């Protein structure tokens, strides 16, 4: 598995040179430092769990392929250990391998690993992780810059043809929003480099995708933006209350209600109501419902996952008039 991270490195960062930043060196995450670093590392994770730093050029070269070999960038949510992020990314890869086993298409999961706290208590972790998500935007914007520069150097005969999708979960959507915000602040614009952006339980304001809001940039970089939400997601209810001190108002979350007004968001935005199954997959919170049924690794592929997989395969979103859909056994793939 390929991994991009701004986690602190055990032993601290070192100055770049051909000798110190050598390819394939063993990389260890710092056991205690959870501050988002200025350095961004390009890694390969072995089945054993060992991490190797391979550098950006080798990393991007490994992503080359055809239009049938798609990529899914997975940006995890808050209060997540590195190991649990690896486990979910692996589970996601297993589901995709199973889903496309009889197809010419393949989908490779690449984990975007940003530093989270997991030992301060849920409330303190929430605020710490908000800061980490925002500050991670600086490093991951640099990754986008490196990728676009690398792609431009390939030339038409050696271009990168693999479609790129994004699955951002919970506060991972905040990471995505601030990454694009940082990029456009310094570069002034962003090419449409993503095929689909799948926003599961997004922990951002429910107006974020409207023009004039910073999340509107997400709608500019993808063919389809699919918002999966659930009214009984307990994490979204807690987030709405937690954000009162900073906003001075009750801030309804995109992962709770979906877009506040579909008429105000671009036509490539779709709203998928997951109320009918989210708590079945993730009791009692109903927050992590993009993997398997019954919230276990041994369960069947869930409705959210199957809908996402269908969009990856077809490039089109199944929805009703108004670009909305109540997803359940009757309406699902």
Image (tube, grey):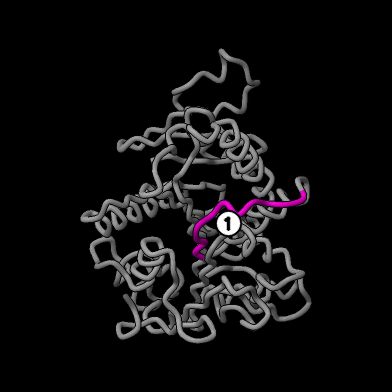
Residue at 70% across, 81% down = 250
Report the number of numbered marks.
1
**Quadrant assignment, res 38:** top right
Q: Is residue 205 above or below residue 61?
A: below
Percent of width and height locating residue 30? 53, 36
Percent of width and height locating residue 308? 40, 66
Mark 1 secondary-structure assignment: loop
Residue at 46% across, 44% down = 161
Percent of width and height locating residue 280? 34, 78
Q: Is residue 216 magenta?
A: no
**Picture quarter with the C terminus:** bottom left
> Hey, which residue is sitting farthest front in the picture?
157
Q: Is residue 6 above or below residue 23?
A: below
Q: Is residue 196 magenta?
A: yes
> Hey, which residue is sitting farthest top in the picture?
19
Q: Is residue 84 above or below residue 239?
A: above
Q: Which stretch is magenta? A: 188-198
**Picture quarter with the N terminus:** top left
Does residue 178 appear left or right of residue 198 in this picture?
Answer: right
């Amino acid at each position: 598995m390929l991994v991009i991270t701004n986690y602190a490195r055990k032993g601290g960062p070192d100055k770049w040179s051909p000798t110190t930043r050598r390819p394939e060196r063993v990389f260890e995450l710092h056991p205690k430092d959870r501050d988002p670093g200025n350095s961004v590392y390009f890694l390969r994770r072995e089945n054993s769990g060992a991490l190797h730093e391979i550098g950006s050029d080798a990393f991007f070269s490994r992503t080359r392929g055809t239009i049938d070999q798609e990529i899914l960038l997975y940006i995890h949510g808050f209060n997540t250990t590195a190991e649990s992020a690896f486990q979910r990314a692996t589970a996601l890869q297993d589901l995709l391998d199973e889903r496309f086993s009889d197809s010419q298409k393949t989908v490779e999961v690449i984990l975007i690993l940003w530093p989270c706290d997991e030992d301060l208590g849920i409330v303190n972790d929430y605020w710490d992780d908000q800061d980490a998500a925002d500050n991670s935007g600086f490093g991951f914007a640099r990754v986008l810059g490196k990728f676009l520069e690398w792609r431009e150097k390939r030339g038409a005969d050696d271009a990168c043809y693999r479609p790129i999708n994004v699955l951002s979960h919970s506060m991972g959507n905040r990471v995505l929003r601030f990454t694009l915000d940082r990029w456009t602040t310094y570069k002034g614009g962003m090419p449409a480099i993503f095929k689909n952006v799948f926003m599961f339980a997004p922990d951002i304001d429910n107006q974020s995708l409207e023009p004039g809001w910073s999340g509107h940039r997400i709608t500019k970089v993808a063919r389809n933006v699919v918002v999966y939400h659930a009214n009984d997601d307990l994490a979204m209810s807690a987030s709405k209350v937690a954000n009162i001190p900073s906003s001075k108002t009750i801030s309804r979350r995109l992962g709770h209600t979906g877009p506040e007004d579909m008429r105000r968001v671009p036509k490539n935005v779709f709203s998928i109501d997951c109320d009918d199954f989210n708590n079945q997959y993730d009791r009692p919170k109903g927050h992590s419902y993009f993997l398997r049924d019954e919230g276990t690794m041994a369960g069947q592929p869930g409705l959210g996952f199957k809908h996402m997989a269908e969009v990856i395969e077809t490039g089109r979103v199944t929805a009703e008039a108004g670009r909305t859909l109540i997803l359940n056994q009757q309406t699902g793939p």
